[in-house]
Amino acid sequence: MSDHPQLSIETRDRLIAEACAARSRAYAPYSRFTVGAALLADDGRVYTGVNIENASYGMTVCAERNAIGTMVNEGGQRVVALAVCTANGVTPCGACRQVLSEFAPDDNDVPVWIVDGQGYVRETTLAALLPDDFGARHLRRG
């Protein structure tokens, strides 16, 4: 069940389904660790992303950052909610948490649903995943 007041169970379920569907398209020939992400943006659209590995591991791009890139490229500006699907239900890495925070409201009150390969869903928030974050508001003058 979604505890976020503005989001319906249907929205949560759609994001989870799209994240898990995206996961099947991930490019992970080295680790075989596939990740799919789906985010709801402020424009009402859902953007997906997958992890794309590279033989030079440092060049690998995570699913969450790919979804953010697609959102920005297509005109979305803020993340409203996010679902991430992996085999074992891990949370976004630190780099993805920071990038997500860049596109979240100042309070980071963005629901995040973490889904594993068996369909178990854990709900958290970006604020819980990235406490005491650093963001644009810290750079504002005046």
Image (spheres, rainbow, N blue to C red):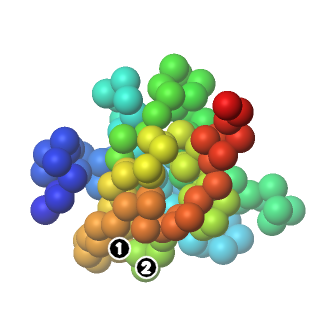
Q: Is residue 107 left or right of residue 31?
A: left
Residue 13 visible in the shown view: no
Point out which mark residue 74 bears. none
Does residue 56 appear to the left or right of 92 in the view shown? right
Question: Compared with residue 136, is residue 53 higher up or lower down, i.e. above or below?
Answer: below
Q: Earlier in the sequence, mark 2 or mark 1?
A: 2
Q: Which residue is mark 2?
A: 88
Q: Assign a secondary structure to mark 1.
A: loop
Percent coordinates x, y for residue 30 in the rendering: 71, 71
Q: Nearer the viewer, residue 102 or 58?
A: 102
Q: Residue at x 38, y 29 (%)?
A: 42
Q: Nearer the viewer, residue 54 or 102?
A: 102
State the residue at coordinates (57%, 71%). 33
> For residue 46, which quarter of the picture?
top left
Residue at (64, 55) in percent of width and height: 134
Amino acid type, residue under disc 1 in the picture: Gly
Q: Which amino acid, mark 2?
A: Asn
In the displayed structure, would residue 139 be above or below residue 129?
above
Q: Position of residue 61 (x, y in %)?
A: 69, 53
Could you tell me how far apart the alpha carbons at marks 2 and 1 are, in whole angstroms?
Answer: 6 Å
**In the picture shown, does residue 51 fall above or below 57?**
above
Horizontal and vertical percent position of residue 83? 37, 55
Which residue bears the numbered disc 1?
A: 117
- How many labels sit on residues? 2
Picture quarter with the C terminus:
top right
**Looking at the image, do the residues carrying marks 2 and 1 touch, with CB atoms under 8 Å apart?**
yes
